[in-house]
Amino acid sequence: MDGGDVSVEGKVTCASCIKRPENAHLAVTGKSTGTCSSLEIFSFNSETTSLSSSPKATYVLEEGGEPVRIAVHPSGDDFVCSTTTCCKLFELYGHEDNLKFVCKEFPLQDVGPQKCMAFSVDGSKLATGGVDGHFRLFKWPTMRIIVDEPKAHKSFRDMDFSLDSEFLASTSTDGAARIWNTTDGVPVTLSRNADENIELCRFSKDGTKPFLFTTVQKGNKTLIAVWDISTWKKIGHKSLYNKPASIMTISLDGKYLALGSKDGDVCVIDVTKMEISSLHKRLHLGTNITSLEFCPSERVALTTSSQWGVMVTKLNVPTDWKEWQIYLLLLGLFLASAILFYVFFENSDSFWNFPDPSTRPKIETLHVDATSEEQWSSFGPVDL
């Protein structure tokens, strides 16, 4: 059924970006008042770096339950929302001026609250990790089960699919981390020292460096660890921002990692250099950041916290070239090359600068008289 066109006041509990054609992206947020909850969809304006002032569509969760996590399919047509009581699947259709979304039948409706949910990069799989530690992996959209492991973790903390969708990394509240083969479900446990907790995880997404990034809490020290996905051995670690992180994400092109701290900061890391590229302090002013995502096509972060709601922030990182800028640069280089070639051609005596035949001097025939010819022939052979 469709939700009513009602905006529910209350705290924002989660949010996610929805990638749409022609960069007409959207954002879906979950809100709760304690007695009533809703899902609201807003449009994104890249020029003003803001969301629309009012929701384009709203769905009231009449069954109750506070939204916990939202996972959006890569196509942008479907998303799954987990609440404290159930899971729901929604289909989105229409355009910005007439957006609607409907609740569809979903076999996970009664599995309880899911702390983690993720679609694979190619959209062929859906993974869920429950507060109770139950791990489920499904083939999408048939929902044929691939893995069903009730005791995968003590309780899920984070999860992420690899770029090729062959692996899924998951972390637990007790500091353990596992790697799941999405074909046969065989897991591998990442090694760690007794004083280390592996908390958050994200796979590289640039297509050239097959790594896994994790945050490791070692006492009061926060580290970024890098793992080789061919051996699952740790390559190294680095201390970049020594604050406990509540959430981590990576841009779709894999160039930047972002960490949200438990006191409201957002730290953006350049993956190539493994250095801090941008730091936004007190973005949510001392509260735990509950959601953090990059906008699909902009260097913009979508963040949420229970106190300050949803925020859209333009990140202080180098701007990527737009497609039209690249074509304009290539055209400029071509024109500059053509001009230089013309100038060189006009001012050079190269082989290709043929003289005009009409201006060539006439060559007169050389006549040799008989006397001269006899003189030349009178010389005998020359001894060398």
Image: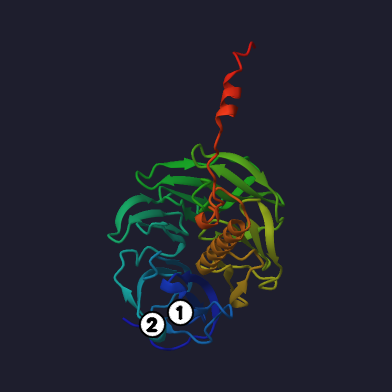
Closer to us: 287 or 183: 183
Let me know if residue 5 appears in the view.
yes
Residue 86: percent from the left, percent from the top?
39, 69
Q: What residue sits 64% from the left and 61% below the top?
A: 268
Say what secondary structure mark 1 lies in.
strand
> Which image quadrant is residue 70 in?
bottom left
- 309 displayed left or right of 159: right
> Quadrant where the C terminus lies?
top right
Residue 329: percent from the left, percent from the top?
56, 64
In the image, farthest residue toward the front: 371
Let me know if residue 175 appears in the view.
no
Q: How crowded is mark 2: few (under 14 residues within 10 Å), some or many (20 or more)?
A: some
Give amino acid for label 1.
Ile
Say what secondary structure mark 2 lies in.
loop
- 143 displayed left or right of 162: left
How many numbered marks are there?
Answer: 2
Q: What residue sits 70% from the left and 70% below the top?
A: 282
Tell me the distance, in whole angstroms, between the alpha carbons under discs 1 and 2: 8 Å
Residue 5: percent from the left, percent from the top?
41, 88
- Is the residue 108 above or below the residue 20 in the image? above
Give amino acid for label 2.
Leu
Q: What residue sits 60% from the left and 40% below the top?
A: 235
Q: What residue sits 44% from the left and 59% below the top?
A: 130
Q: Name the residue under label 2.
A: 99
Closer to us: 339 or 138: 339
- Is the residue 35 above or below the residue 20 in the image? below
Q: Name the residue under label 1.
A: 41
Q: Tags 1 and 2 in contact by the CB under 8 Å rule?
A: yes
> Quadrant where the N terminus lies?
bottom left
The figure's colour scheme reads rainbow
Mark 1 / mark 2, whichever is N-terminal: 1
Closer to us: 357 or 142: 357
